[in-house]
Image: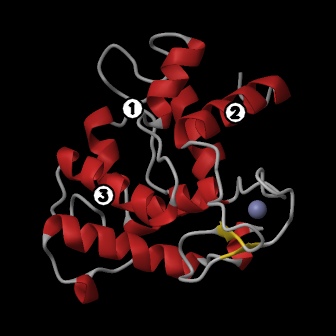
Amino acid sequence: MAQNIVTEEKVIEEVKKAVAETLSSDVAAIQPDNSMIRDLGAESLDFLDINYRLEQAFGIKMARHFILEHIEEMFGEGTAIDENGQLTEKAVRFLQARYGDSFPGFKQNMDMDEVPALFTIRTMAGGVLDILDTLPEKCSQCGNAAWKSDNGVKIICGSCGEQAVFTNGDDLIKQWLTKIQDDKKIC
Ligand SMILES: [Zn+2]
């Protein structure tokens, strides 16, 4: 529903902008399938900055913990990452179920340290879009369904002007893992 208001193209554009500002690079040179680390030279700390810029732009809360950490927390130590720091078969099944073809490259026994290099501009945009998709049907302030966006980025209520509130990124991952568990698709 949010995608009628904020398009994928617009989200990709905003991610590029956040990355360019963080890394002081030329936004025009950034491609959607560029790896943030391998192609654009981002370091771990840069992700905090990029996330912060996206949160400010869209009025959302990005996940602080990657899905692998949530799997370990929910299903026990060693379920996602084995004693050698490599992805387990279960972790790969989760990642493929969650990200599908939009996030290729996950393999069993892959070193955990290689995972961040798989993050692209498009992956980051996917994370933002997932959160935007939690847009409630109606405004919690006035009860009207009149969402709009003046700049194609931040969604506000067209009736009372209240800013939309979304599920935060970490809660969204937890909800998804719980659902997968209940469906017994993986566990
Ligand atoms: Zn309202």
Q: Which residue is mark 1?
A: 109
Foreground tag (1 vs 2): 2
Instruction: For the C terminus, give its image quadrant.
Output: top right
Numbered mark located on residue 174 in the image:
none
Asked if the residue under mark 2 is in contact with the one under mark 3, i.e. CB atoms within 8 Å, the reply is: no
As measured in the structure, the alpha-carbon distance from the residue carrying label 1 to the one carrying label 3 is: 29 Å
Q: Is residue 187 left or right of residue 66?
A: right
Neighbour tally class for label 1: few under 14, some 14-19, many 20 plus, Cα within 10 Å:
some
Amino acid at the residue labelled 2: Gln
Q: Does residue 184 sit above or below 10 in this rendering?
A: above
Neighbour tally class for label 2: few under 14, some 14-19, many 20 plus, Cα within 10 Å:
few
Q: Which residue is mark 3?
A: 50
Amino acid at the residue labelled 1: Asn
Nearer to us in this view, 175 or 167: 167
How far from the left and from the top, in percent, is residue 121? 39, 67
Q: Is residue 68 left or right of residue 86?
A: right
Question: Which structural element holds mark 3?
Answer: helix
Q: Does residue 99 sit above or below 84 in this rendering?
A: below
Residue at image position (18%, 83%) is: 26
Q: Which residue is mark 2?
A: 175
How far from the left and from the top, in percent, is residue 64? 41, 37
